[in-house]
Structure formats: C-alpha cells, structure tokens
C-alpha cells in the first residue's frame, strides 16, 4: 500500500451550532457527520467545547508522569494486564493482535483511567463486568495529575454524549436514542507516550494496525513527527493532522455493528518518525474511548436495515464484545 498526504481528505465539521436549537443547522451537521462516517469513519471537529488549555495541561502533566523513574511508574501498574487501569509499561500491548495480525509489541507506554462515577449497583454481582468497572489507581506524582486528567476525562465524557446525540440524528433516530445505552458506560480515557526508538524490530510500530472497539473515539495529540495514519478506501495511508483547537473523532467496531456497516470502523495505526535521534521530540496523545453500558444490546438499528439490507450481525451485549477484543490485544510477553 502507498502512503499519501493529500489535504482535506478528512472533513472538518463545526459542531457548535447543533445545540443552538436551529433545526436547519442540526440537520446540516448531522448530514455532514453521516457522510464522513459512511466514507471513512474519521472526522475532525471544531467548536466542540473542550478547552484547548485543558488538553495542553493534560499532555503536559502526562509527560511529567512518563518522565518519572520506571520503578515509580510501576507502583501504579496493576498485576492483571487485561485491566485498563493505571500504568501500562512500554511495549506491553499489541493492538495488531486484536485485528488478527502478527506483529511485535507497540512502541508506547500508557496510563488508563475508567469511569469516574461509582460502579453501578446492577453490575455489582456480575463477575464478567468487573474488569470494566474496576476502581481507578493513581500515581503519587506529579502533583495535579489526578485533577487534570479527571477534568479532561469529564470534558471528553460530556463531548462524547453530545456526539452520540448528533449520531442519532444522523441515523434518523430521536436525538436521545443512545442516552440510556451510555448512562452507565465503561469508557476509557488514556494518555499515551511514544518515545523515539532508534532501532525498532522489523514491522514494529508505535501502534500497530487496528480498529477501535467501542462506539467512538476522541483524540488529541502533539505535533511531533511519527503520528496517526488512517487507511483510506483506496488502501493508501493518510496522515491525520489537526489544527489547534480541533479534535479527531473516529468510529469504533460497536458503532459499525449498530449501523449494519453503514458507518465504517476504519483501520488506523501510529507510525515511527522517519528520522530518529535526540533532536526528534517524543509523541504524546490523549484519547477518550466511549464504550456503552456493559449490558447495552448492540444490534442493527431500525434505520439501518430494510428488506434489501438485512442485519449482518447477531445482537451482542457490549461487554461481551469488548472483553473478547481487549483480551486479544494484550501481549503475553513481560
């Protein structure tokens, strides 16, 4: 496959007017989102309400954490690598495996937090739900890490709920259609650090080819070289960049399943920088991954099926879908 960097392949959509009550604006924004999700499953959003300073502060305090000694970071590391909480060490994950590919581990380290609200009582006696509602663990340093990441997570959570309302309108559904399917979500907010590696193994990337697992993903990152690429419909790879204040949004596997593949959960990756050495800055990103309620029933939406377009997938509980995907993406190496 070739790699191209062609401007304006991923649309920028101003979502600010959607909540202003203007039906014409709501319809226009929903149509733009629908076109982007049908064509590529990626879009850039502007006027989204998440303060740029909060994103910058989150990236900054994250880099302070990742610069701490390894033994200190490991104190925020859980023994079960499948649990998306706390510190996950460098090269301990392998997202290409979740996509059925054989590849070396990903060249990144990460810190995960889950929902900030208490675990819903209705899941307390479901052992299979435990992994998704584990309490968060936090490092002692740097100062402000927990506060800043928590604030950014809440802002992204609010934005994700707004996006799901836009999605509902785009899919010819009532705008609150998804509300009761995400009110006890098990979403993940994470910060990732991609250090510069001089001699990676053959085929080893900062993050291997994969699709995301859930409903939608919201991403922000710095402008260091070696970044996000998305596989376009013609099989070329496209560099995803964002201007200051914009966020990247992409569709996950569950939303593709909900829409009967009307919307695309598109393969993407994070590549290594072309040049290495001390002059190359490490890459950082933060991401919010909206995963529905554990017991949300993911099945073909009524607006995405017809006598000529029958459901492709059997209904599945969101937690069952997610557990299978997550376990496949955990590398077994120490």
Image (cartoon, grey):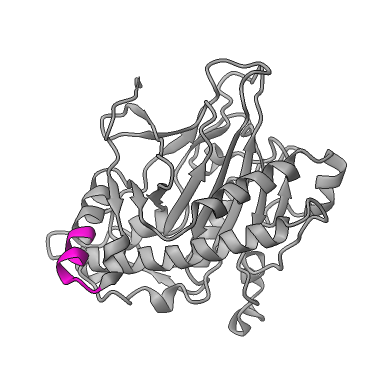
**Residue 241 appears at what percent x and percent y?**
41, 35
User: Which residue occupies the extreme front position in the image?
Assistant: 53
**Residue 110 appears at what percent x and percent y?**
66, 45
Asked if residue 158 lies left or right of residue 256, the reply is right
Mainly helix, strand or loop, the magenta region?
helix
Residue at left offset 39%, top offset 49%:
250
Residue 96 in sight in this render: yes
* In the image, residue 122 above or below residue 149: below
What segment is highlighted magenta in the picture? 21-29
* In the image, residue 288 above or below residue 181: above
Quarter of the image where one finds residue 160: bottom left
* Quarter of the C terminus within the rendering: top right
Asked if residue 305 lies left or right of residue 80, the reply is left
Residue at left offset 42%, top offset 59%:
215
User: Which residue occupies the extreme right position in the image?
Assistant: 71
**Residue 104 appears at what percent x and percent y?**
62, 29
Asked if residue 163 lies left or right of residue 172, the reply is right
Taking depth in this image into account, of 222 and 99 the one nearest to the observer is 222
Taking depth in this image into account, of 124 and 17 the one nearest to the observer is 17
Quarter of the image where one finds residue 17: bottom left
Residue 315 in sight in this render: no
**Residue 195 appears at what percent x and percent y?**
66, 30
* In the image, residue 267 above or below residue 320: above
Tell me, yes or no, whether the highlighted magenta stretch contains residue 216: no
């Amino acid at each position: 496959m070739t790699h191209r960097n062609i401007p304006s392949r991923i649309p920028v959509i101003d979502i600010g007017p959607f909540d202003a009550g203007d039906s014409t604006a709501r319809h226009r924004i929903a149509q733009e989102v629908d076109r982007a999700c049908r064509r590529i499953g990626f879009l850039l959003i502007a006027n989204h309400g998440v303060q740029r300073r909060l994103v910058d502060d989150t990236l900054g305090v994250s880099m302070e954490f990742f610069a701490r000694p390894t033994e200190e970071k490991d104190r925020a590391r859980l023994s079960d690598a499948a649990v998306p909480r706390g510190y996950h060490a460098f090269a301990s994950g392998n997202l290409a495996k979740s996509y059925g590919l054989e590849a070396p581990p990903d060249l990144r380290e990460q810190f995960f937090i889950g929902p900030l609200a208490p675990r819903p009582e209705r899941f307390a006696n479901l052992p299979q739900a435990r992994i998704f509602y584990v309490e968060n663990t936090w490092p002692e340093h740097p100062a402000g890490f927990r506060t800043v990441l928590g604030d950014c997570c809440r802002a992204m959570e609010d934005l994700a709920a707004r996006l799901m309302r836009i999605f509902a309108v785009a899919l010819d559904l009532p705008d609150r259609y998804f509300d009761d399917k995400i009110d006890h979500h098990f979403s993940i907010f994470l910060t990732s650090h991609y250090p510069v590696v001089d001699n990676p193994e053959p085929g080893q990337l900062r993050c291997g080819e994969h699709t995301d697992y859930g409903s939608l993903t919201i991403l922000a990152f710095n402008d260091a070289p070696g970044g996000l690429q998305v596989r376009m419909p013609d099989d070329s790879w496209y560099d995803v960049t964002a201007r200051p204040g914009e966020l990247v949004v992409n569709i996950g596997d569950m939303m593709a399943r909900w829409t009967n593949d009307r919307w695309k959960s598109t393969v993407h990756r994070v590549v290594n920088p072309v040049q290495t050495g001390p002059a190359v800055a490490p890459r950082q990103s933060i991401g919010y991954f909206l995963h529905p309620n554990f017991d949300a029933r993911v099945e073909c939406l009524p607006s995405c099926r017809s006598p000529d377009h029958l459901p492709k997938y059997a209904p599945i509980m969101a937690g069952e879908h997610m557990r299978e995907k997550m376990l496949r993406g955990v590398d077994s190496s120490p």
